C-alpha cells in the first residue's frame, strides 16, 4: 500500500465499525479430528476495531447447497458456542478461510453465515449496514471462477490448482528467413484475459456483487484458472504479477473509476474542473460517480427484482455522507432535473457470461417494469433495462472536447421542482425499499399524438399536436407501450442543453456538410434554414408522460425525448395543444 498512492489516499472511516457477527478464522478442535469455526458476536469485543479485529469478506453465488450451511435461529446458539463444523462448509467457504489464515487476518464475513436467514428483523438491519461491511474490510474475496473458485473446476479434480493453464508459451521451429525473422519461444497474449475472468463471469453479472466489488478497498478474485487482484491503482494476476497492461486488455480500471473511498480533491470532475467552486465540484463529483454506478449496475441481474434500490444503497449512503446531497429514489436533489432525463436501451439485453456449459452469452428479456411496485415511474429503478443517465443540470459552462472538436456547454432549466415526497418501507430509511414517492413540478407540457399514417416498427412515430408540418420525433420508451397509450402522451421539457462549438467534431462536421448538400437540392429548404440558426446544436431534453387516470394533474413517465428550442417556441403560440401549470409525477 505504501507504493500505491491512490490506496494511500483512501479516506479513513469517520467512525470505527465492525459487522454484527464474524467467523473466527482459527479453528477449534475439541479434541476430535473435526475442526470448528466459531461464529462471534462482535458486541462482546472488549475494544474498538483494530488490526486484531480486521476481517475479509466473501462474495459468492448462492447454490442449492448454500442454505444447508446457512445460519438460522435454530442453529445460531450452537454456532456461537461450539462453532460450525468445517466439513459442513462449501469448498469456496473453506478456500476463503484458508486465504484469511494465510494472510493472518483473524476474521471472515460471509452473508449466509453471519446473517440469521429466517429472521426478517435481522436481515433488514444487516442489509442497512451492508455498505459499511464492505467499505471497512481489508479485502474482498470474490469467487469469480465459480462455486469452488480455482480449487474446483470442471476439468480438474477438487482441490487441485490447474496451474498448467498458465503456460502460454509456444516454441516454433522456424528458421531465419530473408526478412530476418527467427524462430524461438513466443508468449501468447489474450486481449480478453481480464474480461473473461472477471467481468464476464456469472458472479459479476449479479447486481448485489456490483456493490460489494465497488465498496471493497481491494478485491482478490478466485478465477477459473488463477488468482487475480485489483485495487485503486493495480490489476494483477498470477500470470501478470506486476500488472496487466491496460492498453491491450478490456475491462480494467473498474476500481480506479469507481473508488468511492478516495478524498474529494482526487476526483476528476471533467474539463475545466479546476475552475469550479467547491460546491460545484461536489455536485459534479456526485454526478460522475453516480452516473458510472447506475450505468454499470443496470446492466446486471438481480435475484430478487424488489432489491433494485437495496442492492445499491451502500454506495448511495457513502455519497450522501461524503457530499451532503439529498438522495431521492436513485437520483439526487442537487441535479434532479438532469437526473430525470435518463433513457433505456430498448435492445435485447445480452451478457457475455461464461456459463457452466462453458458457452458464452445469455439472452435477457427486453426492458420492462416489475409487476410489484418498487419505485416511481420517474426513477430509473422502476425499470429493468440498460439505463443511460442524462446530462447534469448546471449553468456553469463545461468545456467539451470530442473527436477533434471543442466548445462550451451549459444547461438551463425549463421546469421547477416544487416538492419531493418519499415514503420508505422502513421509517427513516430513504436509501432502501420504498412504498411510494412523487414529485411536484411547475412547467409546460406539449401534447403528442401517434402518426398512424407513417410506417414504423415497435415504436411509433410521434408528432406534436397542432404542428401543421407534422415533423416526427422518436420517443425512447422505457418499455413497450401500446400505441393507444402513446397517443395520449405529453412531452414535458425539463432543460435546454446549449452547445456552442468553436470547432465542430468530425462526425458533426460531416453530418452538417451532408445536410447542407441535400438541402441545397431543394431550395427553399427548411433544413437549410435550420442550419443557419445560431441554436442549431441546442437540444431540449425532457420526459414523455401519460395521465394516470386516478387524479387530475397526475402523470406517470413512459419515456424520454429531445426536441429543438425553435419547434417548441412555435408550438407555444398554439395554446390548445400546450398545457401549463403544476403537475404531479408518480
Image (cartoon, grey):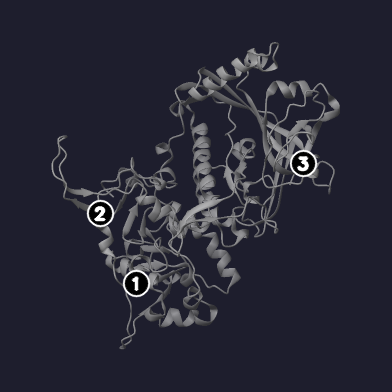
Residue closer to the observer: 517 or 277: 517
Front: mark 1 or 3:
3
Q: Looking at the rendered structure, which numbered label has been put on residue 25?
A: 1
Question: For mark 2, what is the residue?
Answer: 168
Between the C-alphas of marks 3 and 2, the distance is 57 Å
The residue sitting at the front extreme is 178
Residue at image position (48%, 21%) is: 406
x and y, in percent, of residue 567 in the image: 72, 23
Q: Earlier in the sequence, mark 3 or mark 2?
A: 2
Residue closer to the observer: 475 or 322: 475
Q: Is residue 398 above or below residue 315?
A: above
Q: Secondary structure at mark 2?
A: loop
Looking at the image, residue 545 sits to the left or right of residue 92; the answer is: right
Between the C-alphas of marks 1 and 3, the distance is 59 Å
Q: Earlier in the sequence, mark 1 or mark 3?
A: 1
x and y, in percent, of residue 453 in the image: 79, 34
The residue sitting at the top extreme is 523
Residue at image position (42%, 82%) is: 81
Q: Residues within 10 Å of mark 1 (few under 14, many from 20)?
A: many
Question: For mark 3, what is the residue?
Answer: 486
Q: Earlier in the sequence, mark 2 or mark 1?
A: 1
Front: mark 3 or 2:
2
Amino acid at each position: 500500500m505504501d507504493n500505491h498512492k491512490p490506496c494511500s489516499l483512501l479516506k479513513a472511516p469517520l467512525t470505527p465499525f465492525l459487522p454484527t457477527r464474524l467467523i473466527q478464522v482459527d479453528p477449534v478442535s475439541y479434541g476430535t479430528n473435526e475442526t470448528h469455526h466459531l461464529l462471534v458476536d462482535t458486541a462482546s469485543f472488549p475494544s474498538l476495531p483494530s488490526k486484531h479485529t480486521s476481517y475479509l469478506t466473501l462474495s459468492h453465488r448462492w447454490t442449492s447447497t448454500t442454505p444447508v450451511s446457512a445460519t438460522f435461529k435454530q442453529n445460531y446458539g450452537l454456532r456461537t458456542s461450539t462453532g460450525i463444523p468445517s466439513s459442513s462448509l462449501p469448498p469456496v467457504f473453506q478456500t476463503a478461510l484458508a486465504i484469511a489464515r494465510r494472510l493472518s487476518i483473524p476474521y471472515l464475513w460471509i452473508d449466509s453465515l453471519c446473517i440469521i436467514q429466517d429472521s426478517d428483523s435481522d436481515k433488514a438491519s444487516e442489509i442497512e449496514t451492508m455498505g459499511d461491511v464492505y467499505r471497512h474490510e481489508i479485502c474482498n474475496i470474490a469467487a469469480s471462477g465459480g462455486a469452488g473458485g480455482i480449487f474446483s473446476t470442471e476439468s480438474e479434480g477438487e482441490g487441485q490448482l490447474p496451474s498448467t493453464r498458465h503456460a502460454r508459451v509456444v516454441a516454433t521451429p522456424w528458421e531465419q528467413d530473408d526478412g530476418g525473422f527467427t524462430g524461438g519461444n513466443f508468449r501468447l497474449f489474450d486481449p480478453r484475459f481480464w474480461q473473461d475472468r472477471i467481468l464476464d463471469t456469472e458472479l459479476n453479472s449479479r447486481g448485489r456483487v456490483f456493490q460489494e466489488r465497488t465498496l471493497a478497498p481491494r478485491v482478490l478474485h478466485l478465477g477459473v484458472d488463477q488468482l487475480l487482484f485489483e485495487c485503486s491503482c493495480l490489476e494483477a494476476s498470477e500470470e501478470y504479477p506486476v500488472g496487466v497492461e491496460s492498453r491491450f486488455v478490456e475491462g480494467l480500471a473498474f476500481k480506479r473509476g469507481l473508488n468511492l473511498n478516495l478524498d474529494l480533491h482526487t476526483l476528476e470532475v471533467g474539463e475545466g474542473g479546476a475552475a469550479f467552486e467547491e460546491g460545484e465540484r461536489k455536485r459534479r463529483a456526485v454526478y460522475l460517480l453516480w452516473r458510472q454506478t447506475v450505468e454499470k449496475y443496470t446492466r446486471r441481474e438481480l435475484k430478487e427484482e424488489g432489491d433494485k434500490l437495496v442492492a445499491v444503497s451502500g454506495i448511495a449512503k457513502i455519497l450522501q455522507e461524503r457530499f451532503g446531497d439529498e438522495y431521492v429514489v436513485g437520483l439526487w436533489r442537487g441535479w434532479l432535473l438532469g437526473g430525470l432525463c435518463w433513457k433505456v436501451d430498448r435492445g435485447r439485453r445480452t451478457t457475455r457470461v461464461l456459463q457452466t456449459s462453458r458457452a458464452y452469452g445469455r439472452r435477457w428479456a427486453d426492458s420492462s417494469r416489475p409487476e410489484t411496485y418498487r419505485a416511481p415511474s420517474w426513477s430509473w429503478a422502476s425499470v429493468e433495462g440498460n439505463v443511460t443517465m442524462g446530462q447534469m443540470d448546471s449553468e456553469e459552462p463545461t468545456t467539451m472536447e470530442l473527436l477533434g472538436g471543442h466548445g462550451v456547454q451549459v444547461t438551463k432549466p425549463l421546469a421547477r421542482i416544487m416538492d419531493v415526497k418519499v415514503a420508505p418501507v422502513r421509517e427513516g430509511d430513504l436509501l432502501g425499499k420504498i412504498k411510494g414517492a412523487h414529485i411536484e413540478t411547475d412547467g409546460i407540457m406539449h401534447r403528442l399524438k401517434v402518426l398512424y399514417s407513417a410506417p414504423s416498427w415497435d415504436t411509433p412515430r410521434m408528432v406534436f399536436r397542432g404542428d401543421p408540418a407534422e415533423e416526427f420525433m422518436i420517443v425512447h420508451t422505457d418499455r413497450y407501450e401500446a400505441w393507444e397509450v402513446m397517443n395520449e402522451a405529453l412531452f414535458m421539457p425539463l432543460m435546454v442543453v446549449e452547445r456552442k462549438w468553436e470547432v465542430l467534431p468530425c462526425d458533426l462536421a460531416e453530418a452538417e456538410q451532408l445536410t447542407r448538400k441535400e438541402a441545397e437540392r431543394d431550395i427553399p429548404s427548411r433544413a437549410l434554414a435550420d442550419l443557419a440558426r445560431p441554436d442549431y446544436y441546442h437540444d431540449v431534453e425532457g420526459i414523455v408522460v401519460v395521465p394516470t387516470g386516478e387524479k387530475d394533474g397526475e402523470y406517470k413517465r413512459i419515456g424520454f425525448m429531445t426536441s429543438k428550442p425553435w419547434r417548441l417556441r412555435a408550438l407555444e403560440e398554439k395554446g390548445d395543444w400546450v398545457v401549463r401549470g403544476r403537475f404531479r409525477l408518480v
